[in-house]
Image (cartoon, rainbow, N blue to C red):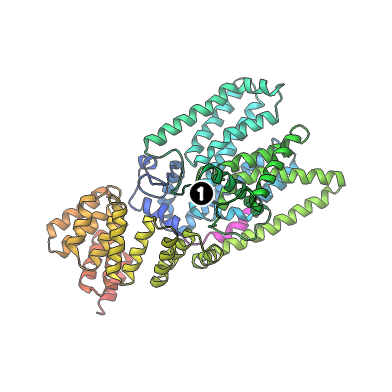
């Protein structure tokens, strides 16, 4: 196992210096730069400061990012390192769990193939996908403890089962997909039933099975109380028949991705099947039926193969879009299912090797396969190093993906490619017009490009789409400030200040300062400090950023005032000091 962990760590080492991408900034910077409390973890969506239309209720995942932020702040390496460590933990737990259901040859090679598969780059190197490795680790811990408990007696059995249920409950707060773990527990119990018939096994463990249901009900109550919907039904409307056809199509696409991971992509556009006779639908249905029949036929003679297939089928079910998700298909959704498929695949290869008496040669062949996978994983990490190139390739592969266009635009915006970003945002909105946050991003890009009238129009539209969203009003207010419309900026922001967004008070303070009302300005600055008293860097950063904006507009007097304000909140703020030196030249 040590060798597997070492190789896995080396393969992912080259991705530690990769930058943040769009979702990383939303989850990490937008959620934590104004501070956090443990209570916030239950109130905030993963991607916003309040429950969003897409209900990402993942407080445990959010907590790991919050703790991470305490040490790493805005440095991507710290977050990527934690993701790699979680992946290594999953690899170790995979090895330990599989050791309970298979022999060492199968366990080692199945774990190796899982650890190095390039589809996992999206789950590990994409910081925002931390929820997948995190819930998988807790799911494996639950299964491991349950298996140990099933082999124990008396108090020891109760001890293992109790902690298995605790791991399940905790995992629900990492990602809602944890709901598949009780089904995997039941599949495991029925596959390795040692207490006589399957009815006897269920009767023996019935009270503990009910424990899963009770804990899931408690989780749902907490989720509802926090204001989050039970599912992630998106704006798309498909009838049940279309969803079933799409599920068969996705089933075939996912298997293709597992066995031929050459063409990897963060976003995929998967057209809804229009007929049951489309070849990918037929192939998916045939593959699904074949795997079910294979698992059934091998349930007694080759339990590890049957269980591995059931693992894959059960854990893949929630991501087949039978309830519509935020995307048709994502590589990181294969993270948990791949463990079961690796077990089934290597166990099957082992049987063939034994019958042909080629155990050594087969082992070398699987190690060579793992080497090929590791090379693709290594190169894929390099591809993530340049988001602009990554998303340019993505829109070339899937020009109908609004997300790909939006993320390409974000990458361009962060490189100062304003005109190109504006074009990409408009392409995204042409595909899907009801993206309120993309309208805001477009408005900000137009503002930075000096297209002030159009920027105001677009940002005002975003505010109209979601009038109570303080962040949208803040973005419009900052634009109005930058063009000298101070009264309008105050009107937009003052009635909708948000305790989660102290920067609004800074913006209001700057607006009053421009109007010569120093007393009111000071009142606003004190309110911002009261909300986040320990964040001197945050307060200074706002005024430094606004000063930079004024500087780009050629408003040198206002820029100097803002930079001096930045130094008031943090006297040694390097960026403000450097910009003030630059201002002296004007």
Q: Secondary structure at mark 1?
A: helix
Residue at 57% from the left image edge and 61% from the top image edge: 381
| Nearest the eye: 144 or 220 | 220
Q: Magenta part mainly helix, strand or loop?
A: helix
Question: Seen from this angle, which residue lies furthest bottom?
Answer: 585
- Residue in the picture at 59% in, 57% down: 12
- Bounds of the magenta segment: 5-19
Q: Which residue is mark 1?
A: 130
Please rate how many residues cluster around mark 1, counting C-alpha atoms within 10 Å: few if below 14, some from 14 to 19, many from 20: many
Question: Which quadrant of the view contains residue 315?
Answer: top right
441 relative position to 339: left or right: left
On the rendered structure, is 355 left or right of 156? right
Residue occupying the point 58% across, 55% down: 121
Tell me, yes or no, if residue 570 can be seen here.
no
Q: Quadrant of residue 549?
A: bottom left
Residue at 73% across, 56% down: 369
Location of residue 62 in the rendering, given as x and y in whole percent from the top left corner: 43, 45
Q: Nearer the viewer, residue 541 or 181?
A: 181
Q: Which quadrant: the C terminus? A: bottom left
Q: Position of residue 504 (x, y in %)?
A: 25, 55
Indicate the position of residue 352 as horizontal and vertical percent values: 82, 45
Q: Nearer the viewer, residue 106 or 304?
A: 304
Q: Quadrant of residue 197?
A: top right
Asked if the magenta segment contains residue 135, the reply would be no
């Amino acid at each position: 196992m040590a060798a597997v962990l070492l190789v896995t760590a080396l393969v992912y080492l080259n991705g530690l210096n990769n930058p943040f991408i769009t979702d990383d900034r939303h989850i990490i910077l937008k959620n934590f730069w104004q501070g956090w409390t443990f209570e916030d973890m239950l109130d905030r969506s993963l991607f916003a400061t309040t429950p969003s239309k897409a209900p990402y209720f993942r407080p445990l995942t959010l907590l790991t990012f919050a703790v991470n932020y305490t040490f790493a702040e805005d440095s991507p390496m710290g977050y990527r390192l934690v993701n790699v460590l979680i992946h290594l933990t999953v690899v170790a737990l995979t090895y330990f769990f599989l050791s309970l259901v298979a022999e060492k040859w199968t366990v080692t090679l199945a774990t190796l193939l899982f650890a190095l598969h390039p589809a996992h780059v999206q789950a590990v190197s994409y910081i925002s996908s931390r929820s997948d490795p995190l819930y998988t680790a807790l799911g494996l811990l639950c299964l491991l403890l349950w298996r140990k408990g099933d082999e124990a007696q008396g108090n020891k059995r109760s001890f293992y089962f109790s902690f298995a249920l605790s791991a399940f409950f905790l995992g629900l707060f990492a990602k809602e997909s944890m709901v598949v773990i009780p089904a995997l527990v039941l599949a495991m119990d029925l596959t390795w039933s040692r207490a006589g018939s399957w009815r006897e096994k269920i009767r023996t463990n019935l009270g503990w099975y009910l424990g899963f249901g009770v804990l899931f009900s408690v989780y749902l109550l907490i989720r509802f109380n926090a204001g989050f919907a039970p599912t992630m039904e998106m704006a798309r409307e498909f009838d049940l028949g279309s969803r079933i056809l799409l599920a068969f199509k996705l089933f075939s696409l996912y298997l293709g991705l597992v066995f031929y991971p050459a063409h990897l992509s963060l976003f995929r556009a998967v057209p809804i099947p229009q007929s049951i006779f489309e070849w990918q639908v037929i192939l998916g249905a045939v593959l699904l039926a074949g795997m079910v029949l294979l698992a059934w036929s091998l349930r007694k003679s080759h339990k590890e193969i049957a269980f591995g297939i059931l693992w894959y089928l059960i854990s893949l079910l929630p991501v087949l879009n039978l309830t519509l998700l935020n995307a048709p298909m994502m590589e990181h959704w294969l993270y948990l299912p791949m463990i079961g498929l690796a077990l089934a695949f290597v166990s099957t290869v082992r049987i063939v090797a034994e019958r042909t008496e080629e155990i050594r040669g087969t082992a070398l062949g699987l190690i060579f396969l793992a080497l090929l996978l590791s090379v693709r994983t290594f190169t894929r990490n390099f591809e993530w190093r340049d988001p602009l190139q990554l998303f340019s390739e993505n829109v070339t592969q899937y020009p109908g993906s609004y997300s790909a266009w939006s993320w390409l635009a974000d990458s361009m915006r962060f490189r100062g490619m304003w005109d190109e970003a504006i074009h990409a945002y408009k392409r995204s909105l042409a595909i899907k017009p009801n993206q309120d946050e993309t309208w805001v991003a477009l408005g900000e890009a137009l503002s930075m490009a000096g297209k002030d009238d159009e920027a105001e129009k677009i940002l005002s539209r975003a505010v109209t789409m979601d009038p109570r969203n303080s962040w949208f009003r803040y973005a419009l207010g900052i634009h109005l400030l930058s063009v000298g419309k101070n009264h309008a900026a105050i009107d937009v922001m003052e009635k909708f200040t948000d305790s989660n967004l102290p920067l609004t008070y800074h913006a209001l303070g700057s607006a009053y300062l421009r109007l010569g009302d120093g007393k009111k300005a000071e009142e606003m600055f004190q309110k911002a400090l009261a909300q986040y008293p320990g964040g001197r860097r945050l307060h200074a950063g706002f005024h430094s950023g606004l000063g930079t904006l004024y500087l780009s507009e050629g408003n040198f007097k206002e820029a100097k005032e803002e930079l001096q304000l930045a130094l008031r909140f943090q006297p040694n703020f390097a960026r403000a000091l450097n910009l003030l030196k630059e201002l002296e030249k004007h």
